[in-house]
Image (spheres, rainbow, N blue to C red):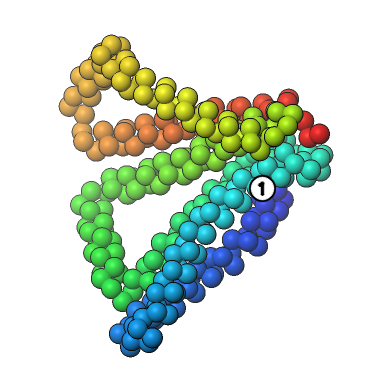
Amino acid sequence: MLKLLKYEWKACARICLPLYGAMLLMSIINALMTTDRAQDIMNGIPTAILAMLFFALLVAVFVVTAVILIQRFYKNLLGDEGYLMFTLPVTVTQHIWSKVIIAVAICCLSGIVAALSISILGANTNLLWGISMVLGEFGRSVAEDPNVLGYLFEGILLLVISIISGVLYLYLCMALGHLAKKHRVLMSVVWYFVLSTAAQFLLTFVLFGVADGPMETVMTALANALNGVPQQTLVHGVLLGFCVAAAIPGAICYAGTHYILQHKLNLE
C-alpha cells in the first residue's frame, strides 16, 4: 500500500508541484506590480497582463487537478497499465484507496496553494488585516467556548468526506463506462450525467415529495426529542449528521467501483 501511495504521489507531484510553484511566483510578481510606480509603467498594461496570467494559472490549477484525478484512475487501472497494476500483490481495495488518498491530498494542496496565492496578492491591501481580524475573533471564540475547535474539526472532516465521496463518484462513473464495449470514455460521461440526474431527482423527491407525509412526522418527532438539548450538542450532532450523509453516497460509489474492478473488469 505504501509503495502504491509513493508511486501515485510521484506521478501527480511531477505535474502539480511545478504548477503550484508557478502560481506562487506569479502571485508574488503581481503583488509587486500593485504599487503606484508599477501601475504607471505603460499605463498599467503589464500589470493587467500579469493579472490575467495569474487568473489563468489559478483556473489551470483546479483544471489540472481534476484532469489528473480522472486520468490516473482511468489509465492506471482501466487502461493498458491495468494489465500490470492488477498483477501486483495488492488488493482491489488498496488500488482504489491509494488513488483516493492521493486525490484528496492533491485537492487539498490545490486549495491551500490557491488561498496562499490570493493572500500574497492581497498583501498590499486590507486582505491580510481582514484575515488577522478573523483569526483573532476565532481565538477569542475558542477561549470563550472550547466547542468551537470541535466545530472546526467536524467542518474539516465534512470537507474531506465530501471530497472523498466526489472522487469515488467519478471512479464509479468511469468504471461503469468501462463496461461498454465501445466508446468507453463517452459512456463514462453519460453515466456521470445519468447518475447526477437520478441523485437530484431522488433528493428532490425526499425533500418535497414526502414532505407532507412520513417525513413531516419524522421531523416533528425529532424536534420533540431534541427539545431541551444544549445548543452545542445540537451543532455537533448536525455536523456529524452531515458527515454521515456525505459518507453514505461515497460508500455506495466505493462498493460499486470495487465490485466492477473485482468481478467485471475487462481490459481488452
Tell me where residue 171 sits by quadrant: top right
The residue drawn where x is 41% and y is 61% is 115
- The residue that mark 1 highlights is 72
Pointer 1 local density, CA inside 10 Å: few below 14, some 14–19, many at least 20: some
Q: Position of residue 108 (x, y in %)?
A: 49, 53
* Residue furthest left as drawn: 228
Q: Is residue 254 left or right of residue 39?
A: right
Q: Amino acid at mark 1?
A: Arg
On-image quarter of the N terminus: top right
> How far across and how far down the image is residue 107, in percent?
51, 52
Q: Position of residue 96 (x, y in %)?
A: 65, 39
Q: Is residue 205 above or below residue 101?
A: above
Q: Residue at x 47, y 24 (%)?
A: 198
Residue pictured at 77% horizontal, 30% vertical: 266
The quarter of the picture where the C terminus appears is top right
Examine the rendering and report whether any part of residue 228 can be seen. yes
State the SS at label 1: helix
Residue 94 is left or right of residue 101, and the answer is: right
Q: Nearer the viewer, residue 28 or 248?
A: 28
Residue 146, position as x, y percentages in the image: 27, 49
